[in-house]
Amino acid sequence: MDTRGRTLLAKIWDQHVIARVSDDTDLLHVDRHLLHDLGGSRGLIDLKSRNIPVHNPELTFATPDHAISTASGRAGTIKTGQELLAALRTETSASGIRLFDLDQPGQGIVHVIGPELGLSLPGCLIVCGDSHTCTHGGLGALAFGIGSSELAHVLATQTIIQRRPKTMRVTFDGRLPFGVTAKDLILALIGHVGTAGGTGYAVEYAGSAIRDMPIEGRLTICNLSVELGAKMGLIAPDDATFDYICGRPYAPQGDMWERAVVAWRMLQSDGDAVFDREVSIDVAAIIPQITWGTSPEHVLGVDGRIPDPADIADPARRSAVEIALDYMGLEPGAPIAGTPVDWVFIGSCTNSRLSDLRAAAEIARGRKVAPGVRAWVVPGSETVRRDAMAEGLDKIFTDAGFEWREPGCSMCLAANGETVPPGQRSVSTSNRNFIGRQGPRARTHLASPAMAVAAAVSGAIADVRTMER
Amino acid sequence: MAQPFTKLTAIAAPIMRTNVDTDIIISINRMIGNSVRGSLGKWAFGSLRYLPDGSDNPEFILNREPYRAAEILVTGPNFGCGSSREAAVWALQEMGVRAIIGSGFGDIFFANCFQNGILPVVLDKATIDGLAAEIEASQGAGRLSVDLQEQTVTSPSGVRHVFEIDPRRRAGLLEGLDEISLTLRREHEIRAFQASDRAARPWIHFAGQSE
């Protein structure tokens, strides 16, 4: 028997093995399967056409988020979005799957509601047909995105076949400097290791900066795991995690809660656990980040200059930078700060939770969105929306000239038709600055919520550290 | 059930950009809806393939002969990074692609390929660059061969490169196995696991209830 220390990943993984299907591949039990409007009904229809029932509807949960309008009253939901919502309602009802429908507490971006409802728990294996499922790893869950075929497999069998990933530990040590957030930490990491740096790995985030970080920040960190190529990212659960989960609607209660916490305290990498790769980041050296290009690895500090292809020797890298700068309409060598913006989007499974909105409102309070800029705030869930309104955050935003909207994915991926117009420049708190991501020919700069507000009120990319109170 | 893949000799198109993400492969607005399959091929690589007025972009390789008929793509690093959308694979499949050869792929895209009978082959970057150069030098005339039984890629000039592949996935592609049916044969194991897990971790199985 191997007596070496085990990683957090190995501990959770081993608890879910139903059968070994080859040397490095296992059949794993799925504890939570989350469905959304984009692919949920298709999977259920596929299964129905094969006369296969849903294996465990009670472990499956659904909500519409991707294709619905976030306008008041859901006005203007595109026809396909309406069809997908209708199909999700019909098919979840037919299969006995709990649906958190529009205007109900529980509806929202699937990666916001899982943690919020207590569906996502430490040690839980969670899948969803969405690559940002890695978000739930912030609670110590093993969570990852799957494709449509795998989704049908999970519905039919409540299992998934997975190859054991390599392990990487990223240690963030130090205290977050003024103006620096979870989003800045993870963007800086992606800039450091690249968008393929985590491919084939499950990443565990550790270190004093992670231990000190509130849960919602940890969700943001894990959310961007897939942008460094890692399908899974996770953080060992601790007292802060348990405090966050306790009392949530689907969390265990009473004696079961006590039992669960005892089990969850075991979910930590052993001191002598060996990782396939280790990366250390000194948090104190990080400044607020902003992307300049068309990949999340195209990122720099807000005091930085846009790269100049002339300085890059490697032809492939030079060509990639040239293509990105051409698409983004940026001048090589110019400071990134001061670049005029047309749109600001605060939302997405990365940065739409209550703490994100509070951080944004803190900068927005008493200021005004610059003339010519359209700025949206799209809360991550119905509960976030109501909680924020109870604190008056909506009023702070609308007084400052932001639009306060209904919960959903919205302009993060523009599946619902809410797009940044062609050629226009957006600062967005979302997770991808890919070509066409926020709409055909839209230009996206990723940043934290506070940095997004700084851009909105300045009319240009700006350093939030000059604005914080 | 995926179609089997055994051996293929075909036109190959090098698409050597770094980080070709799934949004580039298929735009979200072309893939949403439950009845899009069958209409995705014409929208693959839409932002590269078409000019803003909708006409073909003559610069894009898949708009040029003989690459229009490519069944193999030779790709730059981190092809298929980004989202989990299986429509990215469907779109490539619908435009005739059967194999993709690159130095690395997005993890979820890679898994989705196997589910659809598309073979993703990983070779080192120098080999990929060499294959792309050889194809370009022949202006696309040189055919690539991919043999899954032998686990080889043969360049137009006849150089054989051996590739590694997970034996389980190889078998699945060769036989076109249906994973759901295979797993359902393990139903008794799944039920046994759940029965013991209900005792060990009741909070997973009885969400929101106290004992």
Image (cartoon, coloured by chain):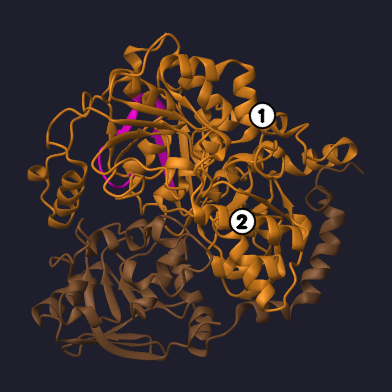
Q: Classify residue B77 by image quadrant.
A: bottom left
Quadrant where the N terminus of chain B sits is: bottom right
Read off the residue under disc 1.
A240
Where in the figure is residue A92, as x and y percent of width and height?
Answer: 71, 58
Q: Residues within 10 Å of mark 1 (few under 14, many from 20)?
A: some
Part of the protein shown in magenta: A278-296
Q: Chain of mark 2?
A: A
Callout 2 amino acid: Val
- The residue shown at (23%, 72%) is B128
Front residue of A417/A33: it is: A417
Q: Is residue A110 above or below residue A44?
A: above
Q: Secondary structure at mark 1?
A: helix
Evaluate whether residue A167 shows in this view: no
Residue under the image location 55 percent in, 50 percent down: A133
Residue type, label 1: Ala
Judge from the rendering whether residue B151 lies leftward or rightward of residue B54; answer left or right. Answer: right
Q: Chain of mark 1?
A: A
The mark nearer the N terminus, 2 or 1, is: 2
Please say if A447 is above or below A7: above
Q: Colour of chain A?
A: orange
Query: For numbered disc 2, what is the local secondary structure?
Result: strand
* Quadrant including the C terminus of chain B: top right
Instruction: Spot the brown chain and give its letter.
Output: B
Residue B201 pos. (x, y %): 81, 51
Assess whether mark 1 and mark 2 are in contact (beta carbons under 8 angstroms). no
Q: Is residue A286 magenta?
A: yes
Q: Residues within 10 Å of mark 2 (few under 14, many from 20)?
A: many
Badge number at residue A127:
2
Q: Which one is closest to the eye, mark 2 or mark 1?
A: 2
Residue found at x 26% / y 47%: A441
Q: Are marks 2 and 1 on the same chain?
A: yes
Check if residue A97 falls in the magenta segment.
no
